[in-house]
Amino acid sequence: MHGWYETEVRVRYAETDQMGIVHHANYLIWFEVGRSGLCRQKGFSYQEMEEGDSLLVVADARVRYKSPAFYDDLLTIRTQVAEIRSRSIRFTYEVYRGSDNTLLADGETVHLVTDRSRKVKSLPQVFKDKLS
């Protein structure tokens, strides 16, 4: 489990607060953008997992804020798979501002694999192989 997937997002005005700083909740949205992109890079989509009756439920989410982002900043979201267990996956993230390469935030999310009835299940081997 190595290698970062990178994607860029540009901060929209609607993502900032009255002080012109990106609202903290947007980082979790950007983590999802990175996670979805990483899965596509690895050869599958969330939709394919769901069609196979495997859903990823967020069990834990953490963000550590280092420096603010502002309207129109071009950000790089770095995502990697940190750990795969039989019934969970942990992703880690870093968010950088492109203009000065400042680390703005880092974090992680832990996802449980469930079926449509919300029962925890093992991650199918095909997805385990693609993510490893």
Image: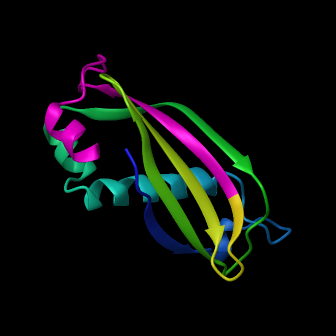
Residue 60 against residue 78 in the figure, above or below:
above
Q: Identify the colour scheme used.
A: rainbow
In magenta segment, residue 130: yes
Quadrant for residue 120, please give it. Answer: top left
From the viewer's side, name the closer residue of 110 and 119.
110
What quarter of the picture does the C terminus occupy? Answer: top left
Quadrant for residue 123, please give it. Answer: top left
Residue projecting furthest to the front: 2
Q: Residue at x 14, y 39 (%)?
A: 126
Where residue 80 sits: x, y (%)? 44, 51
Q: Residue at x 21, y 46 (%)?
A: 130
What quarter of the picture does the N terminus occupy? Answer: top left
Residue projecting furthest to the right: 19
Q: Number of marks in the image?
A: 0
From the viewer's side, name the closer residue of 132 and 91.
132
Q: Report the magenta residues as a range.
A: 105-132
Where residue 35 sits: x, y (%)? 41, 52
Q: Residue at x 59, y 56 (%)?
A: 94
In magenta segment, residue 93: no
Q: Residue at x 79, y 62 (%)?
A: 67
Where residue 52 sits: x, y (%)? 13, 36
Q: Is residue 3 left or right of residue 72?
A: left
